[in-house]
Amino acid sequence: MASAYSFSVVVVAWITYVLLYGIYFNPVHDFAEASQSPTLQLEAEALLETRWWLRGASRALEIGTLSNLSYLNLPYNSFTGELPHSLANLTQLEELDISHNNIVGTIPKELRNCKSLRTLNLQSNNLIGQIPDMLSSYVSLKKLLLSHNHFTGSIPKYTCCSSSLDTIDLSHNFISGGIPFELGISFPVLSFLNISYNNLNGRIPRSLFPIIEVDLSYNFLRVQF
Ligand SMILES: *[C@@H]1O[C@H](CO)[C@@H](O)[C@H](O)[C@H]1NC(C)=O
Ligand SMILES: *[C@@H]1O[C@H](CO)[C@@H](O)[C@H](O)[C@H]1NC(C)=O
Ligand SMILES: *[C@@H]1O[C@H](CO)[C@@H](O)[C@H](O)[C@H]1NC(C)=O
C-alpha cells in the first residue's frame, strides 16, 4: 500500500515537474517535431525518455502500465495522434486532462473502464465522432468537458448516470439534433450546461429550466412557453 502510494506520488510529482519545466523554461513548444510522432503513447514515451525524466530510470514507461495512476494532467502541450487504448488500464484514474493539445480520432470505447473518473477534460483538441454514450460507467464523474472539438451526431439520451455530475461543456462542436429531455433529469446536481455553438435544433425542453447556468446560444433552438 505504502509503496503504491509513493509510486503515485512520484509519478504525479514527476508530471508536475515536467509541466512546470515545460511552461517556465521551455516555452517554445516544438509542434513540428511533435507532430511527427504517430500516437500519443509514443509522445508520452518520448517525453519520458527526455532529460526531464528522473535520473536513473532505465526504460520508458508506457501509460498502460501505470495502473495505479490517479491524475493524468497534460494540458497545453503539443500531443498529437489518437488517445491510446491502453488508457483503459488506468482504472484508478480520477482526473484525465489532455485539453489544449492536437489529439485526433474518436474517444476510445475502452475509456469506459476508467470507472473512477471525476474529471474528463478533452477540451480544445481535434476529436471527432459521437459524444460517447458511456456516462453510465462513470458513477463519480463531476465534470465532462469536451468543448472545442469536432464532435458530430446527437447528444445521447442519458437515462441513468452519475449523481455527482455538475458540469457539462459540449460547446463549439458540430452536434446536431434535438436536446433530449432526459438531459435535464438524469443528473440531479447538474448546475452548469454549455452546449452553445453547435447545430442543435428543436425545442428547449422544460427539464433544463432548473439548471442554474445554461448556455444554449448559437444553435437553431426554439422556446415554447
Ligand atoms: C497498484 O496498487 C496495488 C495495491 O495497492 C499494488 O499491489 C500494485 O503493485 C500496484 N501496481 C503498481 C504498478 O504499482
Ligand atoms: C495493462 O495492464 C496489464 C497488467 O495489469 C498488462 O499486462 C498490459 O500490458 C497493460 N496494457 C497496456 C496496453 O499497457
Ligand atoms: C459557453 O461556451 C462558449 C464557447 O466555448 C463560451 O464562449 C461561453 O462563454 C460559455 N458560456 C458560459 C456561460 O460559460
Image (spheres, grey):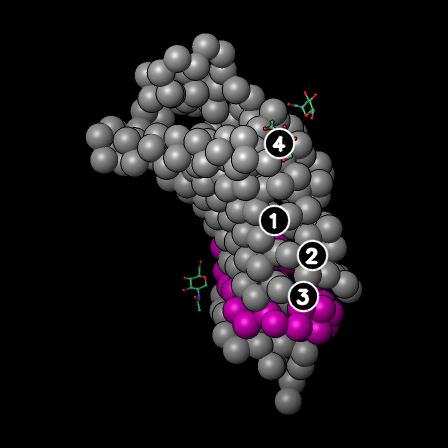
Residue 182: say if magenta: yes
**Residue pushed farthest right?**
159
The type of residue carrying mark 3 is: Ser
Would you place residue 89 above or below residue 197 in this image? above
Q: Are marks 2 and 3 in contact (CB under 8 Å)?
A: yes
Q: Is 31 on the left-hand or right-hand side of 190? A: left
Q: Could you tell me residue 181's position as x and y percent?
A: 72, 72
Ligand 1 closer than 8 Å to the CB at disc 4? Answer: yes
What range is drawn magenta here?
A: 172-199
Task: Give residue 149's mark.
Answer: none
Q: Is residue 3 visible?
A: yes
Dominant SS in magenta? loop
Per the model, the C-alpha gap separating discs 2 and 1 is: 8 Å
Q: Are marks 2 and 1 in contact (CB under 8 Å)?
A: no
Q: Could you tell me residue 108's position as x and y percent?
A: 67, 36
Ligand 1 closer than 8 Å to the CB at disc 2? Answer: no
Residue on which the image places disc 2? 139
Q: Quadrant of residue 62?
A: top right
Which badge, 1 or 4, comes first in the chain's sequence?
4
**Residue pushed farthest bottom?**
225
Q: Is residue 102 visible?
A: no
Per the image, label 3 sits on a secondary structure element best described as loop
Q: In terms of depth relative to the viewer, which is nearer, 175 or 209?
A: 209
How many C-alpha atoms fall within 10 Å of the one at disc 1: few (<14), some, or many (≥20)? many
* Residue pictured at 45% horizontal, 10% vertical: 58
* Residue pictured at 60% horizontal, 81% vertical: 210
